[in-house]
Image (spheres, rainbow, N blue to C red):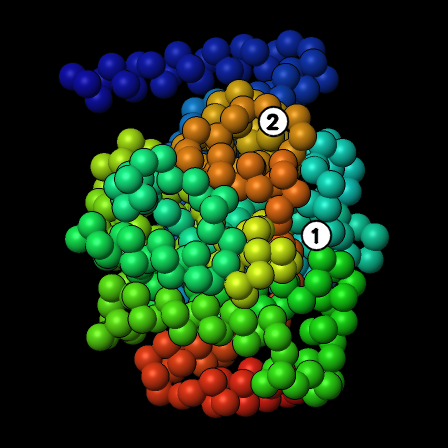
């Protein structure tokens, strides 16, 4: 019976369409094309290299599709431990390039022949100062600044308040000795002082670069330092900033909750330890808040303190944390259609200009946006802490344009140092050789 009804309905539909075809040809053709365009579904893909927000990005994609029913967005995660550069390169090689690729700043220029010129997009004018530096290649903006991030020693204020017998003042820690005193006070309460997560990207991509950024307030001087490293002109054994940072790291190693097996912890251990108050400090960035929140017993009371490099509170770096745009999104122009490119542009516009997109970006993805027009204040405490450092001018350069294999190769060297497999001299040798052998 159902088949018979369906057949009758199809017959009526066919007759109606034939009758409609008898009208004005140009008018109906135009209407037909418009309808087809309006109802055509375009599928686009986004390669996500921030694994900690995979679920939240998928939710954002669903919210976007709800408001734009003719566009679907598939969020493809980069494998843990795989650099986004390697992942995107392999996808291009297989002829399956993502419509949008989320990459580290240092990788953007490598795709200048594959990424769309976005210079005329509205959000370019609304970007905060400096946000487009890494995205501008040969005078063209070829990527979207996705996230402003910062990192340092995350503290659980409830643990520190207990340790200090009152209201903990994070600005009181500006020296190595003051940090060690904080560690001792935390341990005196029965909690552990610190968690050092041993991932190569954390040690090689975040901790070690503090030694570069803290060389000078002047970015040009920092760039010159790296150039001299590459030329073999830097003697790290006698570099005050580098050795100061490593002295702090040596002290941190003593108080590491996992010092007996320092390479065993996974990333997931950190949010649980700091969130449950089992440690007072964790070296990490604001991207960790969604995971910390799952274990939070301190009612969202967290913040950052810098990693001090000396016992002189006035030394550059002792009062600031690295902050910068850390992720950019490029749109492919070689393996995706014009319709897909337009849909990708619409998705990026949605993040910046729609109320739903802004809410997803700031409150669900816990991203500090790189756009002046977004006035939503982040609710998570780590983002708020970063903004306080930005407003006070106490920031270091987030070394976002280091060579793409820096975090993996020198992260491995830092892992060996953390585990006691090499000493300071061995670490210096590996760092200097790495820079001297960059092609």
Marks 2 and 1 in Cβ contact (< 8 Å): no
Q: Is residue 93 visible?
A: no
Q: Answer yes or no: is residue 295 visible.
A: yes
Classify mark 1: helix, strand or loop: loop
Quick one: label 2 or label 1, which is nearer the N terminus?
Answer: 1
Point out residue 220 in the picture as x, y percentages from the top left corner: 78, 63
The vertical placement of 329 against 223, above or below, is above
Q: Is residue 268 left or right of residue 236?
A: left
**Label 2 Cα crowd, 10 Å radius (few <14 / some 14-19 / many 20+):** many
Residue 174: x and y in percent read 51, 53
- Residue under the point 37% across and 16% down: 11
The residue at the point 71 percent across, 32 percent down is: 126
- Residue at mark 2 to residue at mark 1: CA–CA distance: 20 Å
**Furthest-right residue in view?**
139
Answer with left or right where residue 55 lies relative to residue 242.
left
Which residue in the protein does label 2 denote?
A: 374
Instruction: Name the residue: 69% across, 83% down.
Output: 234
Nearer the camera: disc 2 or disc 1: 2
From the top left corner, tell me how far across and down residue 325 is, in percent. Answer: 61, 49
Q: Nearer the viewer, residue 282 or 14?
A: 282
Q: Is residue 99 above or below residue 407?
A: above
Mark number displayed over residue 280 = none
| Image height of 54 relative to 188, above or below | above
Residue designated by label 1: 135
270 relative position to 225: left or right:
left
Q: Give 359 or 90, whichever is nearer the viewer.
A: 359
Tell me the quarter of the picture where residue 241 sits. Answer: bottom right
Element marked by disc 2: loop
Rendered location of residue 214, percent (x, y)? 63, 63
**Residue at the spot 60% in from the left edge and 27% down from the top edge:** 374
In the depicted view, which residue is nearer to us: 274 or 83? 274
């Amino acid at each position: 019976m159902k088949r018979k009804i369906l057949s009758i309905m199809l017959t009526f539909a066919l007759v109606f369409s034939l009758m409609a075809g008898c009208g004005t040809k140009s008018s109906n053709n135009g209407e037909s094309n418009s309808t087809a365009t309006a109802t055509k579904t375009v599928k686009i893909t986004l390669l996500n290299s921030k694994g900690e927000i995979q679920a939240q990005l998928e939710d954002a994609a669903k919210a976007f599709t709800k408001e734009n029913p003719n566009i679907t967005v598939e969020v493809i995660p980069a494998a843990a431990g795989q650099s986004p550069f390697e992942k995107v390169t392999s996808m291009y090689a297989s002829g399956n390039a993502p419509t949008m690729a989320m990459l580290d700043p240092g990788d953007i220029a490598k795709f200048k022949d594959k990424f769309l010129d976005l210079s005329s997009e509205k959000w370019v004018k609304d970007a905060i100062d400096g946000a487009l530096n890494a995205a501008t290649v040969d005078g063209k903006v070829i990527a979207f600044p996705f996230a402003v991030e910062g990192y340092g020693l995350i503290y659980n204020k409830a643990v520190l308040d207990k340790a200090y017998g009152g209201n903990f003042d994070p600005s009181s820690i500006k020296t190595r000795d003051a940090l060690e005193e904080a560690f001792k006070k935390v341990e005196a309460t029965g909690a552990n002082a610190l968690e050092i997560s041993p991932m190569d990207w954390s040690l090689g991509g975040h901790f070690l670069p503090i030694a570069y950024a803290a060389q000078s307030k002047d970015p040009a001087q920092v760039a010159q330092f790296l150039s001299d490293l590459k030329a073999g002109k830097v003697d790290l054994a006698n570099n005050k900033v580098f050795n100061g940072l490593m002295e702090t790291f040596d002290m941190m190693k003593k108080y590491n909750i996992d010092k007996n097996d320092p390479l065993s912890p996974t990333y997931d251990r950190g949010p649980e330890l700091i969130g449950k108050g089992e440690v007072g400090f964790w070296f990490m960035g604001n991207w960790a808040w969604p995971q910390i929140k799952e274990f939070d017993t301190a009612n969202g009371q967290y913040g950052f303190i810098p990693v001090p490099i000396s016992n002189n509170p006035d030394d550059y770096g002792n009062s600031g944390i690295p902050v910068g745009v850390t992720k950019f999104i490029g749109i492919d122009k070689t393996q995706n259609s014009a319709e897909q490119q337009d849909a990708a542009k619409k998705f990026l516009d949605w993040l910046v200009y729609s109320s739903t997109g802004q809410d997803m970006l700031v409150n669900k993805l816990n991203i500090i946006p790189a756009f002046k027009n977004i006035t939503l204040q982040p609710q998570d405490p780590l983002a708020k802490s970063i903004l306080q450092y930005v407003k006070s001018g106490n920031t270091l350069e987030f070394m976002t344009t280091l060579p793409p294999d820096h975090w993996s190769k020198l992260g491995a060297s830092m892992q060996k140092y953390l585990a006691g497999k090499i000493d300071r001299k061995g670490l210096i040798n590996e760092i200097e050789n790495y820079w001297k052998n960059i092609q």
